[in-house]
Amino acid sequence: MWPPGSSLAQGPRLATIAGVAITSTRNPRIREVLALRRRPERERTGLMLVEGHDELAVALASGARPAALYHCPSLTGTSGRDRLLERAAAAGAEVVEVGERVFERIAYRQAPDGWLAVLPAVPTGLARLRVPDDGVVLVCESVEKPGNLGAMLRTADAAGLDAVIACPAATDWGNPNVVRASKGALFTVPVAEAGHDELVAWLRERGLAIVTARPDAGRAFTEHEFRGGVALVVGAERDGLSEGWSRAADAEVSIPMFGAVNSLNVAASAAVLVYEVLRQHGRLA
């Protein structure tokens, strides 16, 4: 919840404040929204931002309950506007109209569409994840770029993965650019954060084979037989995976490279590996 004394601490209301749009960028509520761009503030308040009609629609469809929805009629247009406002209000959001200058101030996109919501942070506890015996999870070690994390969430959603786990979490899941790059998949795919030893023990307890991706691995990913439950582990592009994952790995695979560049973008690598696992599991037939 918002901290005591903030304008949202009193709980949600289902109408624009006093029927008047906020037109000043100095309004205390606007300052509170802007503060949520910073990770320490997101962690302190347990809140995050979601911008964009499509992303918000996915979040609402997944059961998210916004604390507040800020919208700018001159940017949203009329198509589907009332329905999204009604859905947000029904979910408990306080609906707040703002002027175009104000929205452009709080938006983090270059071409905003007039929708921005404040939501509770997604849960990231490892214990809450449920993975079947033949499940597939994606582990991301120290991936710093929010766009890469978001892209991997889109892949995870498309492929029906059971979870995406940051180990460690170099970027928090509530980073606005993670949300944007995921196209809302942050709300459809279970996510978690964990330390290395904790996660390895958790994977072992569930019988998930740990398969790491390394450019220098001796076996191509197409030559490896992915059986049963699998944890695919990818690392940051600059440093790759730590030696701890080499020690923990049941297998190490590489993606063959035939050009001058020695590796793929981490999100692209993850997509290639994920779909090979699905193919071998017979899920693409």
Image (tube, rainbow, N blue to C red):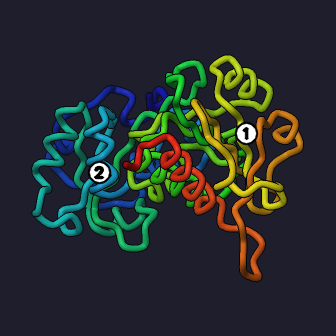
Crowdedness near tag 2: few (<14), some (14–19) or many (≥20) residues, C-alpha within 10 Å: many
Depth check, front residue: 211 or 158? 211
All told, the count of numbered labels is 2
Residue at position x 11%, y 48% in the image: 83
> Residue 259 location in percent, x, y?
72, 81
Between marks 2 and 1, how big is the CA–CA gap? 33 Å
Q: Is residue 247 left or right of residue 106?
A: right
Q: Which mark is residue 70?
A: 2
Which-is-in-front pick, marks 2 and 1?
Answer: 1
The residue positioned 37% from the left and 48% from the top of the image is 285
Find residue 139 and report its horizontal and vertical position in percent: 65, 41
Q: Residue at x 58, y 19 (%)?
A: 127
Residue in the picture at 64% in, 33% down: 193
Q: Secondary structure at mark 1?
A: loop
Dot 2 falls on a residue whose secondary structure is strand
Q: Quadrant of residue 265?
A: bottom right
Which label sits on residue 168? Answer: 1
Spot the residue most to the bottom: 260
Residue sitting nearer the eye, 248 or 37? 248
Q: Amino acid at mark 2?
A: Tyr
For residue 69, above or below residue 190: below
Name the residue type under label 1.
Pro
Dot 2 or dot 1, earlier in sequence: 2
Measuring from the top left, give residue 216's x and y in whole percent: 84, 59
User: Where does the image place residue 157, in percent across and percent down from the top left?
Assistant: 42, 46
